[in-house]
Image (cartoon, grey):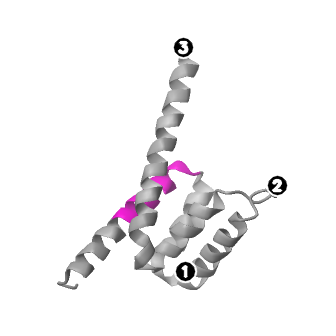
């Protein structure tokens, strides 16, 4: 455990990233939740980093029927687990996107009940 300001910020950023991943896991189907849980395991680093880079690269082919733009945030999340520099911006963006998605989802379900 470090005592420097940078260490504190990195720990806080890691907690924010963990929160974003926890929310994501709660929103996806069980099968995908198990995959994310496995990828978050420190032993999965050798798979996580290349898979994250592959997702980011694949997101640039969003116009193809199989690939989608949603691979970009997924890839960035996977990379951010191991690269502290990405943790703050990726966690902040992910939490914001999740909040917007849940707000949109809630509005749609409210309108459907009327």
- In this view, the residue farthest toward the left is 3
Of callouts 2 and 1, which one flags the residue occurring earlier in the amino acid sequence? 1
Does residue 71 lie above or below 106 as drawn?
below
Q: Main secondary structure of the magenta part?
A: helix
Residue 47 covered by magenta stretch:
no
Q: Secondary structure at mark 2?
A: loop
Q: Residues within 10 Å of mark 3 (few under 14, many from 20)?
A: few
Q: Residues within 10 Å of mark 1 (few under 14, many from 20)?
A: few
Q: Secondary structure at mark 1?
A: helix
Q: Which residue: 28% across, 69% down?
A: 12
Of callouts 2 and 3, which one flags the residue occurring earlier in the amino acid sequence? 2
Specify the segment rendered in magenta.
16-28
In the displayed structure image, the side of residue 95 where residue 62 appears, left or right? right
| Marks 2/1: CA–CA distance | 29 Å
**Residue corresponding to mark 3:** 114
Say which of marks 2 and 3 sits in front.
Answer: 2
Residue 68: give x, y in percent of width and height. Answer: 71, 57
State yes or no: discs 2 and 1 in contact (Cβ < 8 Å).
no
Say which of marks 3 and 1 sits in front.
Answer: 3
Rendered image: mark on residue 65: 2
Residue in front for this viewpoint, 100 or 28? 100
Of callouts 3 and 1, which one flags the residue occurring earlier in the amino acid sequence? 1
**Residue corresponding to mark 1:** 44
């Amino acid at each position: 455990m470090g005592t420097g300001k940078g260490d504190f910020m990195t720990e806080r950023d890691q907690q924010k990233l963990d929160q974003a991943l926890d929310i994501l896991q709660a929103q996806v189907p069980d099968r995908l939740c198990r995959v994310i849980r496995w990828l978050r395991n420190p032993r999965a680093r050798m798979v996580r980093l290349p898979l994250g880079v592959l997702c980011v690269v694949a997101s640039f082919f969003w116009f193809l029927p199989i690939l989608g733009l949603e691979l970009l945030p997924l890839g960035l999340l996977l990379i951010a687990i191991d690269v502290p520099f990405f943790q703050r911006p990726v966690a902040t963006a992910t939490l914001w996107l999740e909040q917007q998605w849940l707000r949109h989802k809630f509005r749609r379900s409210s309108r459907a009940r009327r």
